[in-house]
Image (tube, grey):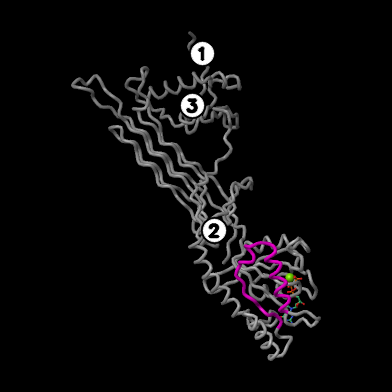
Amino acid sequence: MFIDEVKICVIGGRGGHGRVSFRNVGKSSYKRRPEGGDGGWGGDVLLEAQPRMRTFLNLTRQVHWKAESGAHGGTNSKTGKSGKRLIISVPVGTVIKDLQTQEILYDLTTAGERVRVAGGGLGGRGNEAFLSNRYKSPRISELGEKGDQRWLKLELKMLADVGLIGFPNAGKSTLVSKMSSARPKVGAYPFTTLEPSIGMVAVGNDDFAVVDIPGLIEGAHEGRGLGDRFLKHVERCRFLVHLVDLGNFEGRDPLEDYHKINHELQSFSSILSEKPQLLIGNKIDLLPEEEVQQQVERFADNGIEMLPVSAATGKGVDELIKRCAHHLKEFEDELFETMPFSEEEKVYTFEEDPAPWKIVVDAEGFLVEGPQVRRLGMLRLNTEDGIVYLHDRLESLGVFDALAESGAQAGDTIRIGENEFEFSEEPSPQL
Ligand SMILES: Nc1nc2c(ncn2[C@@H]2O[C@H](COP(=O)(O)OP(=O)(O)OP(=O)(O)O)[C@@H](O)[C@H]2O)c(=O)[nH]1
Ligand SMILES: [Mg+2]
């Protein structure tokens, strides 16, 4: 089975809660020092591009992927352990989209490249962090923040394994339809195929992708017949199956054709000239056995191995598939050993709103959000101290005034993070 698209939900780990704890100072039990530790951070969720992976099969067994939560803060100023991050392996060539907006968030193109798709929540601060002149024995702490939750659509931009190249009419499309379940258009005339198309070939439990490329012509490397575009495509294949037409009796010579196409590859780029190739002599059903043998020998005399097949009858196609699978394994190991691993961890972040905080009015009431109020959304409101602290902070940021200006009335619901409270119009203390 070939899966080129999958939907997943990624969830960062929740931060650990901050702790409220006190220690007696000296002998007297009147003096107490806050000593509650902070919670640990929640783990992030990352996607990592793995060169050995070809499909999203490993992602189909579950939909929700959640990183570990942070541990709660301890007594004696102990910070909780951070949650482990969750690294999800995906194939190189994975395009990450926002499921709802379909917006492309990131494109994983290099092996080893990682991208953070959901951040873990902040650890809540313990009461030690709130010690100040105003709060000498604070019963104030924060809950761990929830991690980001995000629905993603992953798409595999196919980097085909095997690219089929050759002159127009050599039988590439016919061969693809013999090798795979793909059914590209076949025509008894050149330039039947106008766009590259992909077929998946199943070999036992493995599969590989073969791409049917429109026919190349002389001057392709300079853009003749859109050749440069197609050659760019060929550059991304792991190896090439080169087709020559043995059944062409219109004065064409297969050996010459072979050199001409290779000349185009060489003129285009060193990537292409170094790409491993397997040569196929196609349409052997059109000539007698001895002539096929003669052609094989002629190529062999020039130091070129040629595998005779008939895309039409299927003769030699199984052998071809076997060879492709074998070479891919061989090249894969090589690729894996030599492929430079990206050390750099790229972190995708959504565009941050420049406002330190702002008020959003929605159907449920008033939402206050932004980096400056982020931690207020984590504040535990189960103590008098906590409520006073929240009030002080909102007051000094000017949030109450702004709420009133946005039309908030007494009794309206105000949300900050996971906290909810009612707006009250009691006048703020004036100095
Ligand atoms: N007799 C015979 N005809 C073949 C064989 N393979 C392909 N053909 C015929 O050759 C013609 C061209 O085949 P295509 O598969 O369209 O060739 P192509 O290389 O994809 O051509 P372009 O898309 O134009 O580059 C068609 O008429 C096919 O039926 C074969 O093995 N034997
Ligand atoms: Mg074709």
- Residue at the location (63% across, 70% down)? 240
Image side of residue 140 versus residue 403, left or right: left
* Amino acid, disc 2: Pro
Q: Earlier in the sequence, mark 1 or mark 2?
A: 2
The residue indicated by pointer 2 is 91
* Amino acid, disc 3: Phe
The front one of 201 and 273 is 273
Identify the residue at the far front of this view: 302
The residue indicated by pointer 1 is 427
> Residue 364 at what x, y percent from top left?
57, 32
Q: Answer whether labels 1 and 2 touch (C-beta < 8 Å).
A: no
On residue 305, the disc is: none
The front one of 70 and 294 is 294
Q: Separation of disc 1 and disc 2 at Cα?
A: 59 Å
Location of ligand 2 given as a quarter of the image: bottom right
> Residue 79 at what x, y percent from top left?
34, 36
* Picture quarter with the N terminus: bottom right
The residue indicated by pointer 3 is 421
- Residue at the location (60% across, 31% down)? 362
Q: What residue span does the magenta drawing correspond to?
A: 254-283
Q: Earlier in the sequence, mark 1 or mark 3?
A: 3
Q: Is residue 381 magenta?
A: no
Question: As displayed, is residue 30 above or below residue 141?
Answer: above
